Image (cartoon, coloured by chain):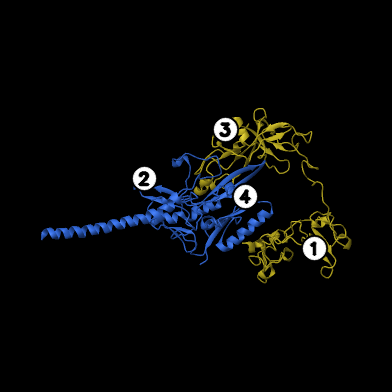
């Protein structure tokens, strides 16, 4: 099956944040209403960015940047959510199978299988997964964008685009086959370059083995707050490729050792009986 | 919905092709005559991404004159004419005054009797020398006008300073519009006490007074509090940090809101003096899930000379840390 993806064109985005609200609405995520009546003091962070950060109930958030160069001010907008990497660190470290690669390429998430270990948070080069634990039960859960494939709320299997794409008025977000979106993205970057945006870049074409959320940028990724060369931390790779297999070896050796110990001890016991 | 707005020929059930075919005898329908021709039968516009829906066109082709009209990019009223009164751009023979940037041009070889190349000609009449009529078709005399009759402050356009302003009118000896309406003259703020220019406006997350949107939790979360936007320069002068509570005060009243310090506001240089501007959003009020001060407390009661539109985009305030 062809891989699916989302293409975000930062040059088309008006930062209306319809995507941010539609994401919460479709995925039935709680809002954080900063009213005095709720016992939460009113809070505007001195920014258009509210809520101030991703959270288990905020999977998508728009970022605003004011970049001034040579007296020219640009107000830049960036989409912040799971990037759905091909070489996803979170999938690699997830011990329970809660995080997995969907057949369509993106990183699915089955919340019921999550044990709340938090390894995925360390493994994500984009700082996306957010973690919460229940004060009474101590049960912890991670949460992040599921590409609208949460069980019971799965738009993709029904043939719909993700909720954020559906709501985007200027078509800054489009959804489709990754190959087709790559072609569209490359073409738009060429148009931007022809207009003098020499740093224009299609982010996600190669990063992390290919992202399933790609960005058309009219400047370098760093200007938009995106890591220029994202990678999974070395310790994480060591965990999955070395320490964990080593753990299985050590564990296995222990079981074998115990078995041998039992047989030897039993043989000794028989000898003593005789 | 777009089809209903375009309208139908009710005798055939087909989409109406153009407003010229609309009739007042009940045989046609149209939600808005201006939009008639925007959504036609699929065979009339087969290459549109949504066949027949001309608003869905996304072709960057700019032929024949390449002046930036892009006639196949979406659709505009009326009948996809990109520039109204466009026959004013040609001489009596139909040749463009500006030969390098023709909007339309008469082509005698087009069709049986000649026709226009370029934009959809307004009228649509033949050139004047071939029996056409003047291009400003919505005026009885067909001519352009320097001013419109019937304006209280006519006949010519003039710049007047707002009722409250930190500067003298540099363009005219008349400081304010002599015909505007002032309800409460005693409520005028002086620039020595209120030196900062203030504008009120909306954010896209909220609607007007916020009676609907301030009861919508997801929207409140996205824009939780009223704020006052100001330049980094003004914030530094007043000792205000981003996110601080500030009091914005005019001769009418005061509000307490969050300071949003931004590079998007810059001090003006006016008549040799440095003038600061701040912006306050007005969506809040005292009821609802999220409550806060409304910027309407600050605004002056001044009515424009012709329409009574109030002067809410330019008045005087002072700002201080709360």
Q: Nearer the viewer, residue B197 or B251?
A: B197
**Marks 3/2 same chain:** no
In three-dimensional space, the C-alpha distance between marks 3 and 1, rounded to whole angstroms, equals: 60 Å
Q: Quadrant of residue B249?
A: top right
Q: Which residue is mark 4?
A: A219
Callout 3: few (<14), some (14-19), or many (20+) C-alpha neighbours within 10 Å?
Answer: many
Q: Which residue is mark 3?
A: B240
Q: Position of residue A61 (x, y in %)?
A: 52, 49
Q: Which residue is mark 2?
A: A135
Q: Is residue A214 above or below residue B149?
A: below
Secondary element at tag 4: loop
Count of marks, rendered view:
4
In three-dimensional space, the C-alpha distance between marks 1 and 2, rounded to whole angstroms, equals: 74 Å
Which chain appears blue? Answer: A
Secondary element at tag 3: loop
Callout 2: few (<14), some (14-19), or many (20+) C-alpha neighbours within 10 Å?
Answer: few
**Marks 4/2 same chain:** yes
Callout 1: few (<14), some (14-19), or many (20+) C-alpha neighbours within 10 Å?
Answer: some
What quarter of the picture does the N terminus of chain B occupy?
Answer: bottom right
Tag 1, which chain? Answer: B
């Amino acid at each position: 099956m062809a891989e699916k993806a989302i293409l975000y064109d930062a040059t088309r985005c008006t930062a209306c944040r319809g995507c941010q609200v539609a994401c919460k609405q479709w995925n039935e995520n709680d809002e954080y209403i900063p009213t005095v009546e709720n016992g939460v003091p009113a809070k505007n962070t001195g920014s258009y960015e509210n809520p101030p950060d991703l959270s288990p109930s905020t999977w998508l958030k728009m970022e605003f940047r004011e970049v001034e160069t040579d007296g020219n001010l640009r107000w830049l907008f960036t989409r912040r959510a799971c990037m759905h990497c091909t070489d996803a660190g979170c999938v690699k470290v997830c011990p329970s199978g809660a995080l997995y690669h969907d057949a369509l390429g993106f990183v699915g998430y089955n919340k019921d299988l999550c044990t709340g270990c938090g390894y995925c948070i360390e493994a994500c080069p984009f700082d996306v997964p957010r973690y919460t634990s229940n004060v009474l039960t101590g049960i912890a859960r991670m949460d992040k964008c599921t590409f609208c494939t949460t069980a019971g709320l799965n738009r993709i299997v029904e043939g719909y685009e993700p909720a954020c794409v559906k709501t985007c008025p200027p078509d800054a977000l489009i959804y489709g086959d990754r190959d087709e979106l790559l072609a569209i993205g490359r073409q738009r970057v060429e148009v931007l370059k022809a207009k003098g945006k020499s740093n224009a870049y299609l982010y996600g074409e190669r990063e992390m083995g290919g992202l399933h959320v790609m960005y058309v940028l009219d400047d370098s990724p760093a200007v938009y707050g995106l890591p220029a060369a994202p990678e999974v931390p070395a310790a994480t790779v060591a965990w999955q490729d070395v320490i964990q297999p080593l753990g299985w070896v050590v564990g296995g050796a222990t079981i074998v050792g115990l078995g041998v110990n039992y047989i030897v001890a039993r043989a000794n016991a028989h000898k003593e009986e005789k | 919905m777009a089809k209903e707005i375009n309208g139908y020929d009710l005798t055939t059930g087909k989409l109406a092709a153009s407003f010229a075919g609309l009739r007042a005898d009940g045989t046609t329908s149209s939600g808005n005559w201006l939009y008639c021709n925007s959504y036609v039968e699929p065979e009339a516009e087969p290459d549109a991404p949504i066949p027949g829906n001309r608003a869905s066109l996304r072709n960057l082709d700019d032929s024949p004159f390449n002046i930036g009209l892009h006639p196949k990019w979406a659709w505009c009223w009326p009948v996809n004419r990109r520039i109204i009164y466009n026959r004013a751009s040609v001489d009596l023979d139909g040749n463009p005054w500006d030969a390098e940037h023709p909007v339309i041009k008469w082509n005698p070889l087009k069709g049986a009797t000649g026709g226009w190349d370029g934009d959809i000609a307004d009228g649509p009449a033949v050139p004047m020398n071939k029996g056409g009529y003047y291009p400003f078709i919505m005026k009885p005399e067909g001519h352009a006008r320097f001013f419109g009759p019937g304006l209280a402050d006519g006949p010519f356009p003039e710049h007047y300073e707002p009722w409250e302003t930190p500067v003298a009118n540099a363009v005219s000896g008349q400081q304010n519009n002599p015909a505007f309406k002032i309800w409460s003259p005693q409520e005028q703020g002086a620039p020595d006490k209120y030196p900062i220019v203030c504008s009120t406006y909306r954010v896209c997350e909220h609607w007007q007074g916020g009676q609907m949107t301030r009861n919508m939790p997801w929207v409140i979360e996205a824009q939780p509090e009223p704020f006052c936007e100001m330049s980094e320069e003004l914030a530094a002068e007043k000792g205000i940090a981003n996110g601080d509570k500030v009091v914005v005060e005019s001769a009418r009243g005061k509000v307490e809101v969050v300071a949003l310090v931004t590079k998007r506001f810059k001090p003006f240089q006016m008549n040799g003096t440095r003038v600061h501007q701040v912006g306050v959003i007005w969506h809040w009020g005292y009821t609802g899930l999220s409550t806060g001060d409304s910027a309407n407390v600050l605004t002056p009661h001044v009515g424009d000379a012709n329409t009574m539109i109030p002067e809410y985009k330019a008045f005087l305030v002072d700002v201080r840390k709360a």
